Amino acid sequence: MRIVVLVSGTGSNLQALIDAVESGDLAGVEIAAVGADREGTYGIERSEEAGLETFVVNFNSFPTRDEWDAALTAKVASYSPDVVVSSGFMRIVSPDFIERFKGKYLNTHPALLPAFPGAHGVRDALAYGVKVTGCTVHWADAGVDTGPIIAQEAVVIADGEDEESLHERIKVVERRLLIDVLRRIAVGQVPAPVA
């Protein structure tokens, strides 16, 4: 199963995927390429160090969002991925991108969706005062953190915990969950979402 991983930052989930592929924990999964939406991400650096093919479709190099999105769609499609993994990719893609990779675009989110969607799921959960949050792996659709949920796992919030420490604990669970979901997709245990 060929995957393309999209990152915007440090790529900690990506590193877990690289390690799982190299160790055989994700047997049958090949990381075809890793792409970013801006120059200078540690996620791209990690990928290059691992000998993976990388690309950058820099959001700021295009006059319009539509032109950037079209370039990203074409670049990702050039690798013929079976699954596209949004791994800390902080750009909302267009309905055209979603349609092109329908049933193939996987997203992780640091909350138990549908609760606390958007860019600040951890902060929002803390502000709301919930005692349990977690992470979700789901098929992305044209909405913001909507789309069919594949797997979730809860994380109990410790008394007095801050956003940074909670997010780090969620990431540990998120990495394990993402690897498990990709393993299950690779062997046909996770169906593509119903249109």
Image: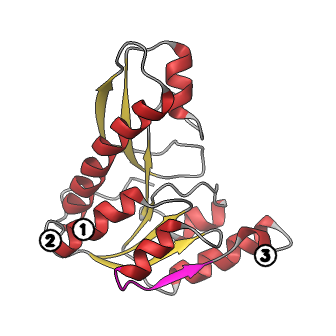
Q: Toward which corner of the image does residue 117 lie, by quadrant? A: top right
User: Does residue 111 show up?
Assistant: no
Element carrying mark 3:
helix
Viewer-closest of 17 and 143: 17
Image quarter (top left, top right, bottom left or bottom right) of the N terminus: bottom left
Q: Is residue 164 above or below residue 1?
A: above
Place of residue 82 in the rendered image (x, y in percent of width and height, measured from the top left)? 36, 74
Which residue is labeled 1 in the image?
19
Name the amino acid, label 3. Ser
User: Does residue 108 show up?
Assistant: yes
Answer few, some or many: residues within 10 Å of disc 1's Cα (few below 14, many 20 plus, some between 14 and 19). Answer: some
Magenta-tinted stretch: 50-56
Count up the numbered dots. 3
Viewer-side label of 3, 1 = 1
Which residue is labeled 3 in the image?
61
Answer few, some or many: residues within 10 Å of disc 2's Cα (few below 14, many 20 plus, some between 14 and 19). Answer: few
Q: Earlier in the sequence, mark 3 or mark 2?
A: 2
Question: Residue 101 bears which disc, if any?
Answer: none
Which residue is labeled 2 in the image?
23
Colour convention of the picture: secondary structure
- Viewed as shown, does residue 139 lie left or right of 181? right
Residue displayed at 83% across by 68% down: 64
Name the amino acid, label 1. Asp
Q: Earlier in the sequence, mark 3 or mark 1?
A: 1
Q: Toward which corner of the image does residue 105 lie, by quadrant? A: bottom left
Contact between labelled residues 1 and 3, with CB atoms less than 8 Å apart: no
Q: CA distance from mark 3 to mark 2?
A: 37 Å
